Amino acid sequence: MARVSVTGDTLTVEVEGLDRLWAVKSRIEIPLSNVRGATADPGIVREPKGVRAPGTHLPGVIVAGTFHRQGEKVFWDVRNPNLAVVIELSDEKYTRLVVEVADPRATVALIEQALRG
């Protein structure tokens, strides 16, 4: 699971617990100016992931780490698809961040409000 926060003009994703090990990453910071938006999307886990490097993928159990597909680099940290949030980025090393959060609706609202504000 990940914790998403916004401080000033920075969006921070902190990977929690053992997911840090599986994702091979503990923290990602993105300038808000490079965040295009966020959506809750439980169906995203059915999407092809691409080549894992580095990370973990046990279908139906966990998707965590960096995946490369069709020229895109996507960071994943999802165990429970019902809690998945997709954060779309521009001008960053990742095209998207797909993370499991405790409350997807609240996380999307937090990001969207920060982008408006």
Image: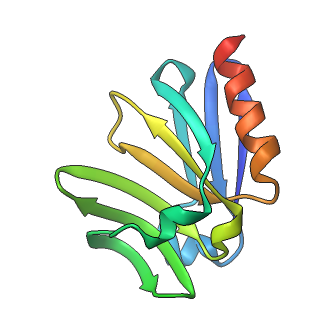
Snapshot quadrant of residue 115: top right
Q: In the displayed image of the protein, which residue is found farthest to the left? A: 71
Q: Residue at x 71, y 73 (%)?
A: 17
Q: In the displayed image of the protein, which residue is found farthest to the top? A: 117
Quarter in which the N terminus is drawn: bottom right
31 up-or-down from 108: above or below: above
| 27 on left or right of 46 | right
Colour setup of the view: rainbow
| 97 on left or right of 84 | left
Snapshot quadrant of residue 79: bottom right
Coordinates of residue 21 in the picture (x, y in percent): 55, 77
| 87 on left or right of 111 | left
The number of numbered discs placed on residues in the rendered structure image is 0
Quarter in which the C terminus is drawn: top right
| 63 on left or right of 47 | right
45 up-or-down from 72: above or below: below
Q: Which of 48 and 62 is in front in this view?
A: 48
Coordinates of residue 51 in the picture (x, y in percent): 24, 72
Q: Residue at x 49, y 75 (%)?
A: 63
Q: Residue at x 47, y 38 (%)?
A: 88
Coordinates of residue 100 in the picture (x, y in percent): 66, 62
